[in-house]
Amino acid sequence: MGSKRRSFSNSSSIAGQNIDKKLREAIDNDNNTISDNPLLQDIKDDPSKIEAMTIQQLRTALRTAGIPPKGLKRELVSALQSYLAKEIDGESSLLADKQDPSSNSDKRIYMMMETKSVEDQVQDANSFSKVSKVQQSRRTVKQLQIKGKTVDVNAKMVATEQKKSACASGRMTSLTKKKASSDVDSKYVSAKNRDTLPVNLSEPWTILAHKKPQKGWIAYNPRTMRRSLPTENTKFVKILSWNVNGLRALLKLEGFSAMELAKQENFDVLCLQETKLQEKDVESIKQSLIEGYENSFWACSNTRLGYSGTAIISRIKPLSVRYGLGISDHDSEGRVVTAEFDSFYLLSVYVPNSGDGLRRLTYRITEWDPSLSNYIKELEKSKAVILTGDFNCAHEEIDIYNPAGNRRSAGFTIEERQSFSTNFLSSGFVDTFRKQNPDVVGYTYWGYRHGARKGNKGWRLDYFLVSDAIADDVHDSFILPDVIGSDHCPIGLVLKL
């Protein structure tokens, strides 16, 4: 999570005294969330303290967390550890995952997890549910309405139902377009039952996953919410944007096909972020580009090799191309590519992460964001601007699964969110997805750890922002959560010309 764990004495008496103090504070405060509870926060910061707790301390801590304190000491320890693990999982720390990028082997493991059989995934879900706080007291049988039929959510029956559906529709978790209807319609799942219900494992994004969902919020479902393309007589451009978290690793990934993505989406322009390419890699990558997309422009980091990097790949030849913001302090990490087209400028942008301990937060909100804002406002003097990429910021609570648990996490601090509003939205730019879908929960990033994508515990970090002058010309702004291969998924924009 970015905060350093505090060291503590090995002496059980000292540890016990500290825990007793936290217990008294917890009881006085009567809190039951980690972010507000001093005891739970203290244990979360250093989980090894759990082993030093007495049975009475363990029981009090579990009651504070709302978990029935039953069993012997080892069972109490296990229950508390499971609770803390789930809470940390729910936070889906942007910092931990993005600063320790997955290796190729990590991605392969993740792909295997995404593509394993439905029956295996249901068994995994049931294995995990055994350690949930609901299952600590007793095994229960949950029921879920699936298209008007009551289905017993027993591992075997769910596996059978899901397997039959998968066979009938012929779908696999791949880059091919999803044509069959979902087995489970998008619907609200209460916080109490969310971790024990078997989500629609083939399309987890169709389940509304949020710690504190508001009335009227619904889950994003691209099959039903994406708009048909404009009529043949209407000129338009289709742009995709994707943080690929390492382009070379993505292209080598078994199960990924750039050709399939291009065939499926038939985009005109593709913007990439976090390519992690070095200058020496660019020519070989260009040689492997899909036919018809000969125009490509790449910005690479020259201070940290294999870091950051952005690109624009287009079948439309731009009028001009620029790299960076024109400020040396900002332009050494390959974070901006600008392409000028007939009626607009297009920017592929990878905004700096605020980093471990928020060490780059000040730089980001006082230097980077204002500089980018000034740059695009200068471009706007001649034509409209489309700004897309990974902004490393979930702007509102609807844009993140666990807002309360991430108040001081990079990507959701109040400073970053205010900077996003001030430098972009209040400066005349429109968040196209949010304008089109004001009450829709749609994520674009899920950490590799803890199965965040399977549970749809994500963040919306990727945006298409456009000049207000062309906001009404946006025909569609969409997310492609079914495209795997990175911890982010692509997003898209259809703009009428």
Image (cartoon, rainbow, N blue to C red):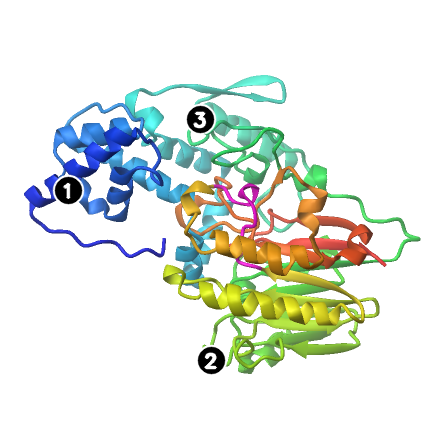
- Which one is in front, 160 or 146? 146
Report helix, strand or loop for mark 2.
loop
Quadrant where the C terminus sits is: bottom right
Closer to the observer: label 3 or label 1?
Answer: 1
Q: Position of residue 185 (x, y in %)?
A: 62, 29
Q: Which residue is mark 1?
A: 18
Would residue 257 be visible to someone looking at this image? no
Q: Are marks 3 and 1 in contact (CB under 8 Å)?
A: no
In the picture, measured across the screen, residue 14 lies left or right of residue 376, that is left
User: Which numbered disc covers residue 193?
Assistant: 3
Secondary structure mostly taken by the magenta-highlighted segment of the chain: loop
Q: Position of residue 415 (x, y in %)?
A: 49, 56
Q: Amino acid at mark 2?
A: Thr
Q: Amino acid at mark 1?
A: Asn
Q: Amino acid at mark 3?
A: Asn
What residue do we see at 45% from left, 20% from top? 142
N-terminal-most mark, 3 or 2: 3
Q: Which residue is mark 2?
A: 303
**What is the span of residues highlighted in magenta in the rendered image?**
391-401
Does the magenta portion include 440?
no
Does the magenta portion include 396?
yes
How dense is the environment of label 2, judged by Cα within 10 Å: few (below 14), some, or many (20 and up)? Answer: few
Vertical placement of 320 versus 28: above or below? below
